[in-house]
Amino acid sequence: MKELITDEEFDNFRDMGIISSAEHLYEILDQAKKFLPHTCNLRCNVPRTSEDGETVFVCKVKDNYWRSLSPLCHTIQPVDTPHTPEAIAIYNRLGMMDGKKVLEACLRAEFHVPVSSREDPKMSTTNPHLFCCFPSCQNIQYTTGHTISAYLVKYCAKLDDVARGLVKPPGRDSESAAKIVMEQLHKTKISSNKILAEKTKKRGVNYGRFITHTECISVLLGDDLVQSSVHFKHYSTCPREYRPALVKRTSQPSSIDLQDYVANLALVGQEVRIGQSFETTRLFSSDQMRVIYDERTSSLTSDAITQFSIRPPELKYVNSVRLYTRWFEKIPIVFREKKIDVIRQELRKRLCNDLNNCQWINGLNVQIVLRRGAIVEILEYARTCDPSLFGSDKLKGNMLALLAQLKKYYIQFDCNSDGAFDGNEMESRSTRQTTLDSSKLQYRKLSGRFLSPDKCTSLPVPWTTPVYPKNRGRFLIFILL
């Protein structure tokens, strides 16, 4: 306590206006005597097993006077941190350890032993400047290396000591809403998830896993709980009324009849295809038109299954939700105005009979493009598909030719950094350059129509929440999808 504020610090604090006088200093030291010394009570006692095998309760606060050879000075003591054999092997491979010897400073664990005396062996460590500004029990610890990570993990994984909320699944009275029931713990301190799990197990009731505030906020914000170099895409196979969705903003003109506008908006894509004399197999089916109309009249956003059901007729041969989610992505079309005539005029520019010049536009007038890393996969897949999925042998041949051309240009310009031809070709330099420029121009046009602007070659991994046979209706839909 004597070393809390030295004479030099007192002069500095007085010059800064933090301490006004000697009487003010004595007042701060009196507050320190109230807040900083540790007094044992029931909350600091932890069970330990004695040599006789009996359970005894001891104070968990360390006696700092005997932890250091120099108790009158701040010292940093090393700590031997045990690592699993798997972790040691990884650290050795990364060059962070040599056998069991730590080479990186971030892996060294150290703890801070504050100044103490025989009279005050269990002082709550503090900073003189902070204590003068905010007199309180602060328990400041200076940490380095591995200790910083352990300290952060401790508070990120700490459960609430006052109350907890139990999230219960939807019931018969409200099938689309979960319930949260709050339980007051009456300041009962929670030490770990394991203790709670054991208590729950004894009661014979499985409430699931208790999560911390940090994890709960991450779930509510939709943050990724696991960081990975692999990109995942989720789609729900629940019945349509149970699939998650957001309320969408309406952007249709308010000066016209809403019902007529929605009806015309749902039909405009089909009308353009009919007006361009498309083959029957390149028109939306009656089932698709019903889904399109339902989506246009709905106030909720569409899900991945619905997007798959109203995919462009040119892509009907991709009859797997998983593959469609893995290979394709959406690019919204920006219309000058939301008027039907403007939308129809824009779609006429993008849709045509020539398969090489016709964009893939779904039932919601959204452009569908192929991820560049999926070109090889979809070409091999299309070759194995039955011609009836394309509509005819001719349409299958045209689609295969288009995909083969995309693959050729993709390998030539995206996979090869130089984009040059083989040097053994018996052509002049100018001829090769002219051909190269022509191919680049053609590839640029095809990329704008059919390929994603993102040149990343990695593909997402589609996944869905598992459904079990006990939910018969949902399980049947899950199998069908």
Image (cartoon, rainbow, N blue to C red):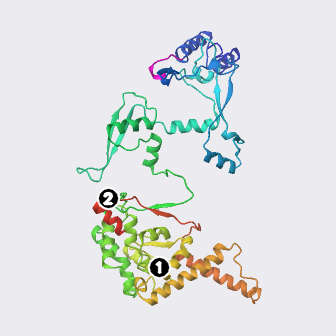
Q: Looking at the image, which residue is at 46% across and 64% down?
A: 462
From this view, report whether residue 79 is shown above or below residue 40: below
Q: Which badge, 2 or 1, is on the more N-terminal residue?
A: 2
The kind of secondary structure element at disc 1 is helix
Local packing at callout 2 (Cα closer than 10 Å; few below 14, some 14-19, many 20+) is few
Name of the residue lying farthest toward the left: 173
Q: Nearer the viewer, residue 149 or 419?
A: 149
Q: Which residues are magenta?
A: 38-45
* Percent x, y of residue 351: 45, 81
Left or right of 149: which side holds 234?
A: left
Q: Nearer the viewer, residue 276 or 88?
A: 88
**Residue 344 visible here:** yes
Which amino acid, mark 2? Tyr
Magenta stretch containing residue 62, yes or no? no
Give the residue number, with chain letter if any, for mark 2.
242
* Percent x, y of residue 192: 46, 35
Q: Quadrant of residue 84?
A: top right
Point out the image quarter for the C terminus: bottom left
* Percent x, y of residue 107: 66, 40
Which amino acid, mark 1? Arg
**Residue 261 visible here:** no
Q: Nearer the viewer, residue 341 or 181?
A: 181
Judge depth for marks 2 and 1 and give the one in front: 2
The kind of secondary structure element at disc 2 is helix
Give the residue number, with chain letter if any, for mark 1.
350
